[in-house]
Image (cartoon, helix red, strand yellow):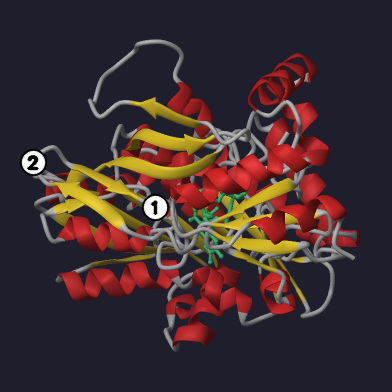
Amino acid sequence: MTSPTSEQLLAAHPRASTDPDDRARASVDRSGFIPQSFADGVVFAQDIDDVVLTMKLASEHGVKIVPRGAGTGLAAGSCAQAGEVVLDLSAMNQILSLDPVQGIAVVQPGVINAAVNHAAGEHGLFYAPDPASTAICSIGGNIATNAGGMWCAKYGVTRESVLSLLVVLPDGQLLRTGRRTIKGVAGYDMNALMIGSEGTLGIVVEATLRLRPKPKHTATLVSYFPDEAAAASAASAVIAAGLTPSVLELMDGKTLSAVDSALGTDHHSRGGALLLAQTDGYGAHLEMQALQDAIEPLAAHSELAQDPQHAEALVEARRQAIPSMEKLGTVSICDIGVPRNRLAEAIAGLQRIEAERGVSIFIIAHAADGNLHPIIVVPEGQSITTGSPKAALADMFYLAKELGGTLTGEHGIGLLKQDWLPEEVGETSLQLQRRLRAVFDPQGILNPGKAI
Ligand SMILES: Cc1cc2nc3c(=O)[nH]c(=O)nc-3n(C[C@H](O)[C@H](O)[C@H](O)COP(=O)(O)OP(=O)(O)OC[C@H]3O[C@@H](n4cnc5c(N)ncnc54)[C@H](O)[C@@H]3O)c2cc1C
């Protein structure tokens, strides 16, 4: 039954839908979280005025609003339930301007990440934050989760590539954060605060993004190792050698098998674990030589890409890792971070958790950041948020904590990881964060129950 407050908003907004299919689709993301009920309705925003009207009506009637981009989140941050209205921003998907000289693009929040890179590429530029979901996730969602990706090893996460935002606050007011200049320290950094706030402080309706010149040269290497421990030690050796690869991705043996089954490749027959490395810039090939020297004592076999097509095929195997696992069942993609010299210990700990909890765990990692994605796969229809998978998730958090790491490197807290947040950030920080949230949203109407 639709709540009376939602009913008032849905009746008054010209872009609102209460169609059951729309409500069902808008209530889930890609985390595997199964809501007990569906949202009361969905507003499909076409422009900023639609968003402003939504928030004005929401604050007038006390309606809970769940912002939604492309719904590819992995922390149930855009999942919604009865008593809530989803604000879908996917139709606000225009690149408003692109200045190739300044290296700046102004975009609407629903623009797909890969579309920004496509447009930038036409001017010899690129947008660095490249989640593996680049083809399906939106810039608004990337900003709300401070998304990372493979190139973040060298170029940083979303926060390093967003110069300015236009945000609709919970009461419908417009706020401009940041600036168009590369430097700027006037006042508190509201831009940085907004990025990674998981749709709890405001709705991003426009973003000014920083583009970078495409590197003149890129070198790509795939190395196979006898096992995961050797691959992790090799990744640590790369960092210890003072190198800055633009990509350094690790895949364990189980992941290689899943990719091989899905793509018809034969990676697993060549080794028990794989490292994909790229170096770029004018010295790409020199740096790659140094990287090869650093990992050679540990690698069983390496393959240097001979041309861009070969390089793209090697990178594609990594991009297809998660879709390959999705063919095996329901996946829960976890996201711990550890200090970069403790990768091997983290992988050993994950293998111990797999044995102890009796769950199937595949491991991929952004090795240069120490950001691991242990992926729990359960048979289709089985819950990933209760029982052994949930216990394994808790074990992973304690493993990360023990190693001096974090519960989430790039996916966010959403609904799924709230149990462990207080232990990571501490009571003082948590209370301060909640007070800060209440300053932006005194009625508590924006993405309630999520993030903090
Ligand atoms: C196969 C696969 C691979 C992935 N790989 C990566 C990866 O490599 N790196 C990574 O970081 N993530 C990855 N993800 C997770 C996901 O793609 C990212 O979290 C992405 O940033 C979510 O974007 P979205 O548009 O789908 O957001 P949604 O799922 O729609 O929303 C995510 C959060 O952002 C909020 N939100 C969305 N739009 C707005 C807005 N305009 N204003 C305010 N809040 C908003 C929502 O309320 C929610 O809290 C992957 C997911 C999949 C399925």
Q: Is residue 410 shown to the viewer in this render?
A: no
Q: Disc 2 residue type?
A: Val
Residue at the spot of label 1: 150
31 left or right of 278?
right
Q: Disc 1 residue type?
A: Met
The residue lying furthest to the bottom in this view is 264
Callout 1–callout 2 Cβ contact below 8 Å: no
Residue at the spot of label 2: 101
Q: Is residue 29 shown to the viewer in this render?
A: yes
Q: Nearer the viewer, residue 50 or 451?
A: 50
Residue lying at 60% horizontally and 75% vertically, measured from the top left:
325
Q: Is the C-beta of the residue carrying label 1 under 8 Å from the nearest atom of ligand 1?
A: yes
Q: Quadrant of residue 145?
A: top right
SS at circle 1: loop
Q: Nearer the viewer, residue 389 or 117?
A: 117
Q: Position of residue 263 (x, y in %)?
A: 45, 85
